[in-house]
Image: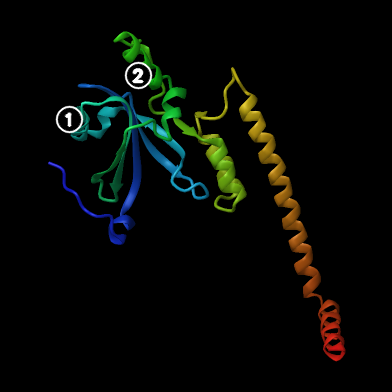
Amino acid sequence: DTVWRPYDREFVSRLKQEIDLSGVCIDQEIIIPAIIKKTCVAQYEKGVTLSGMLYPFESLGGYCEKTIRMMQAFRYTGMFDMEFNVTEDGKIYFNEVNFRSGGPNFAYFKAGANLPAVVVDELADGRHLPGDAVVDRIGQNFIYEKVAWEDYLHGFMTKETLDQRMRDADFGLLYSREDPGPYLFKLREFNRLNRNRAIQEKKQAVTERVTSLPAYQKAEEWTKKEYEQLR
């Protein structure tokens, strides 16, 4: 049985981790290749998964059967995305289900599971390639580089934390050896914005130093007095 409760402030303060799972329903056949335990959620682009780790679906324990029964009850064919919240004491609470491809779905694709292909093949031919429903990077950590760069540029993450998260990642969602173009484009954009940010910070530091000088403050006071006299 499922216990429903509102997400009040006290409850939200006890949340420790978010779990995402993407899958496919073919009426009563439910395919869930893995789950994602989010290790970091973006602050600038609120709610977007910045990094996470792939775990077996079976690691949800008793919630596996409940999840499958719930999705079977919908008699739905297509992709879905589901979220759970984990509290500090280890309890798992169902959050939501969306009947569409979810935000972290591309992590499954980069890890070997082509869920959109499963749906298309089933609708077209009534069967899918078994390998399209298998994740081969269980236990690996991924990072969404674009989202991480944005958090750093907007002051939600230090450079040290950004560098550490990039080193900790086993694979990125943006980088592809076969097609490096999108990654290189975003990397150049990040470097340009980062240089602009550094220039603005230096200008601000110089301005603060200059305006704190006694000579500058005296000149400003004199200017104000002259302006008042002219009025």
Q: Quadrant of residue 97?
A: top left
The answer to whether mark 2 and mark 1 are in CB contact below 8 A is no
Q: Residues within 10 Å of mark 2 (few under 14, many from 20)?
A: many
Please state if 30 lies on the left or on the right of 167 as rendered. left
Residue at 72% from the left image edge and 41% from the top image edge: 192
Q: Which residue is mark 2?
A: 119
Q: Is residue 19 left or right of residue 92?
A: right
Q: Secondary structure at mark 2?
A: helix
Kind of residue at disc 2: Val
Which residue is rendered at x = 30% and y = 45% of the image?
A: 85
Question: How many numbered marks are there?
Answer: 2
135 and 189: which is toward the camera:
189
Q: Is residue 84 shown above or below 58?
A: below
- Pinpoint residue 110: horizontal percent, then vertical percent: 47, 23
Q: Quadrant of the C terminus?
A: bottom right
Give the vertical position of 43 relative to 213 (above or below): above
Would you name the residue on which mark 1 appears? 73
Q: Quadrant of residue 217?
A: bottom right
Residue 102 percent across, percent down from the top left: 39, 34
Mark sitting earlier along the chain (2/1) = 1
Q: Secondary structure at mark 1?
A: helix
Task: In the displayed orientation, state which residue is furthest to the left.
Answer: 1
